[in-house]
Amino acid sequence: MSVNWKAILSLFIVFAIVGLLIFSPKGQKIVGNRTAPIGSFIKTISGKVTKSGITETKTLDVTLTDVSPSSLGDLEFQIKGDRFQGKLEYELISLLDSSVNFDEREVDVQTGGLTGTVSFFRNGNMKITGKTNSLKINSMNLEKQDTNFLITGKPISYDLPNINEKKLEFSYISGSLKWSGLSGIAPMLSNDQLELINFDGSIKQSNELVTITGKVDKIILNGVEISKT
């Protein structure tokens, strides 16, 4: 069978011309928007590859247990409409800018929805302040729109379920630290420095010890970064 070299050469020249028309700047001027679907397809493919590389989540599940309340010193959280429930040995209670005293030093506190702040101090105390439409302290129940209140004291138990912070930073923290992918025994912290980046989780206390659980982008322990690979 003879090969028609002229036909093959002609096809090669045709393909070369089409390629120049599609991809060269001068060719684009000639064919105009006729190649737009091809260009859009290529851009879409490359865009998906780039986006998938950027937006891929690499979060870590993290748990801190047996944490001393004093380890939370200087942390402050903004609460927007969440219920608060906890028990404290109170030092000060102020309602509607007036001090209130109870016979018992331990008080159960419940709010129907708190808009305010929860702060922690280096001596292990906490402060809850803000506005609520429903406040119950032991047997006292107050239903009043935008009630201003402030409570400080030593926490016995509480639950903060919806904490979202760009960074939780602990200057010194003691307790047990676990994270997803950890192999071996969980490290015990003793006055260590810890940063939790993009934390989404909860902080609760019971039996005089704090538990912190949630998801983070990365952990920085004593300057060493721990992230999911």
Image: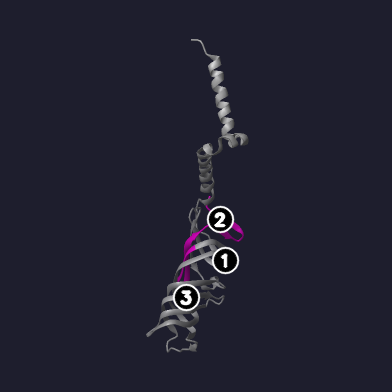
**Spatial CA span between label 3 and label 1:** 23 Å
Q: Amino acid at mark 3?
A: Thr
Magenta-highlighted residues: 200-229
User: Observer-nearest residue: 14 or 162?
Assistant: 14
Earlier sequence position, callout 3 versus callout 2 = 3
**Spatial CA span between label 1 and label 2:** 15 Å
Q: Quadrant of residue 114?
A: bottom left
Earlier sequence position, callout 1 versus callout 2 = 1
- Expressed as whole percent of the image width and height from the top left, the position of residue 190 reads 56, 66
- Expressed as whole percent of the image width and height from the top left, the position of residue 151 reads 48, 82
**Spatial CA span between label 3 and label 2:** 34 Å
Q: Residue 70 bears which disc, if any?
A: none
Query: What residue is drawn where x is 62% and y is 35%?
Result: 26
Q: Is residue 148 above or below residue 214?
A: below
- Expressed as whole percent of the image width and height from the top left, the position of residue 84 reads 43, 75
Is residue 174 in view? Answer: yes
Q: Is residue 184 above or below residue 33?
A: below
Q: Secondary structure at mark 2?
A: strand
Which residue is labeled 2 in the image? 226
Query: What residue is drawn where x is 55% and y is 20%?
Result: 10
Q: Amino acid at mark 1?
A: Glu
Q: Secondary structure at mark 1?
A: strand
